[in-house]
Amino acid sequence: MAGKGMRCLSEAMRGLSLGAPTCRTVPVRTAPLISRRSMATEAPVSNITRSVAEQWTPITTVPVTVHAFPTLEPRSLETYSAKHLYLPLRRDILHLAVVYEGDNTRQGTAQAKTRWEVAGSHRKVRPQKGSGRARVGTKQSPIQRGGGKSHGPRNRDFGTSLNRKVYDLAWRTALSYRYRRGELIVTEDGLDLPLPEDFLQQAQDGLLTRELEDAFIQKYVGEMLGAMQWGKAHGRTTFITGDERMNLFTAMEVAGENGTALQLQDVDVKDLLETGRIVMERSVLKEMIRQHRSDLVSSIVVPGMKHLKEPALGTVLYPLPKSPVA
């Protein structure tokens, strides 16, 4: 049986050796195999290199239209640097600024009395033993009614710190966010709410009660802002002026559901992000940017090196003439 198996194996090996070609008979390829179809997306070489050859010119200035209020008639066209009103949205920086402002506005005046500050005698209420009741200490103990407070709030400062350049960048980022969304409206100086002449005359003559005045102002402001799509139904409006304007501020106090009015010194980053749009005077915008540009202005002067120029604050391109009064 063993000899028969060896004979079969030798015959099989002999057949393989005869049928298998040798290395000398295998044809040698002189050129690499070229596929007729590529799996990648093919494009002309000129289209690929065209974008590289073109020079990239980023935006350096953005236009700002100055309107008249409340007609919103264009008065002039100005340009501002892209570093002032065209910064990309940075939610992390805005979050840091809002938290920083919130921490520094906390009063931190809450203070609970401890057991050593509660008035009264500090003698032991009853003997330690013999009364059959639980052992207690003084009346000022935290477990007694009217006693001190354990681990209660104390006077403290909740304020935190933030780099000034980061805070100024957050201001301009908030303005840029409003500008890019078309929610930053710049008006001429002297922004105020015009009220009807007959209403002002009746109010000065004392013919109207306080309730009637408030009701009229609330309805008047609601209809005016509603027609301009600035009212409660469209996210409310924040008016920012250089100083207090009597008509505007009084109307916004009465009709607070439609918006609010603030002076420049009372505005923070959170106010620029709360309502649906921001309406501010031209001088207020310039002053706001001037106060928050520390990261753009360098106070270090190196001899022999060219000092970087500061971006201009609003360059008038085309002042539009005022329309004649009918």
Image (tube, helix red, strand yellow):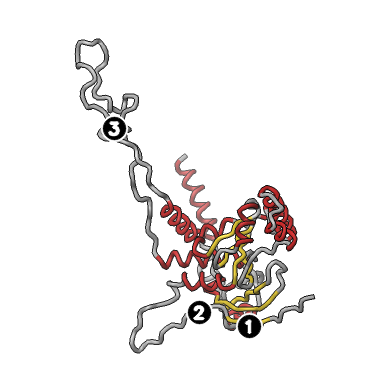
Residue 221 seen from this side: yes
Mark 3, secondary structure of its residue: loop
281 or 27: which is nearer to us? 281
Amino acid under label 2?
Answer: Pro
| Residue occupied by mark 3 | 118
Q: Which residue is mark 2?
A: 311
Residue under label 1: 317
Count of residue discs: 3
Question: Alpha-carbon distance for marks 2 and 1?
Answer: 16 Å
Disc nearer the start of the sequence (2/3): 3
Residue kind at label 3, given as amino acid type: Val
The CA distance from mark 3 to mark 1 is: 70 Å
Residue 189 locus on image (x, y percent): 61, 72
Residue 68 x, y percent position in the rendering: 68, 71
Left or right position of 245 against 207: left
In the displayed structure, 140 sits above or below 235; it is above
